[in-house]
Image (spheres, rainbow, N blue to C red):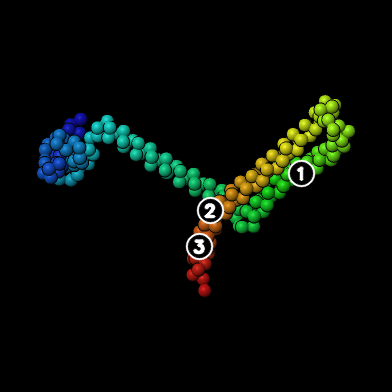
Amino acid sequence: MGALAAETAGSIYTCVDANGRRITSDRPIPACLDREQRELGATGTVRRVIGPSLTEHERAQLEAQKRKQEEERNRIADERRRERVLISRYPDRAAHDAERAAALESVDVVTATAVKRIDELKERRKALDSEMEFYQKDPAKAPMKLRRELASNEADIEEQQRFIAGQDQEKQRIHKRFDAELAQLRQLWAARAAVPAVLPGGAAAAAAR
């Protein structure tokens, strides 16, 4: 206890106030609560630097700034992780092109199924139209079952056409995604290529003759 008292007893506080005056005191200086002040030992060495005392609003601003900085650090870290995953998955252009082609092919397969279904529906429509020829003078006399089949056939064709249109949009989304990835990958591949290979013993390959 006595040693601690002896250590702090000779403290001197010094700062420059808002008016530019240097103030010295044997205790914390009220005029410098809004700015930095230094605690000096008996020999004049700096024991510690005391930061400005913050108001509640200033503390809230400081905390908000810290959170923002932390979020930015996390965002950058996440972005770097995604870049590492991306370049690991696509080490070169051929790998990326192959996956794009596979994604497009899967869309083409389901689109072909829908096209085939439309062809089947159109064949059925021909048979239904042949039946309706008997009632061409007065279609209202056609059997309700036949009219329901015609309406259902038409609705099914429209549904398949909407599905095909949706698949066309899906292909556009795939191209857009892979184009964006390719632009990023080009930068990553270029950066990787710019890093000199390291030979055993720590010598760069570029230094080899």
Q: Which mark is residue 194?
A: 3
Front of the two marks 1 and 2: 1
What is the x, y in percent for residue 30?
15, 34
Residues 176 and 43: in front is 176
Q: Circle 2 sits on which residue? A: 184
Residue for point 20% across, 30% down: 1
Can residue 124 be spotted in the picture? no
Can residue 28 be spotted in the picture? yes
Front of the two marks 3 and 2: 2
Amino acid type of the residue that numbered disc 1 sits on in the rendered structure: Val
Residues 63 and 170: in front is 170
What is the x, y in percent for residue 149?
81, 30
Amino acid type of the residue that numbered disc 2 sits on in the rendered structure: Gln
> Disc 1 versus disc 3: distance between alpha carbons?
49 Å
Which SS class for mark 3? helix
Q: Residues within 10 Å of mark 1 (few under 14, many from 20)?
A: some
Left or right side of 130 for 6: left
Q: Which mark is residue 115?
A: 1
Left or right side of 134 for 116: left
Residue for point 28% across, 32% down: 57
The answer to whether mark 3 and mark 2 are in CB contact below 8 A is no
Which SS class for mark 1? helix
Residue 166 picture quarter: top right
> Disc 1 versus disc 2: distance between alpha carbons?
36 Å
Q: Earlier in the sequence, mark 1 or mark 3?
A: 1
What is the x, y in percent for residue 51?
23, 39
Amino acid type of the residue that numbered disc 3 sits on in the rendered structure: Ala
Residue for point 20% across, 40% down: 35
Q: Residues within 10 Å of mark 3 (few under 14, many from 20)?
A: few
Q: Residues within 10 Å of mark 2 (few under 14, many from 20)?
A: some
Which SS class for mark 2? helix
> Disc 3 versus disc 2: distance between alpha carbons?
16 Å
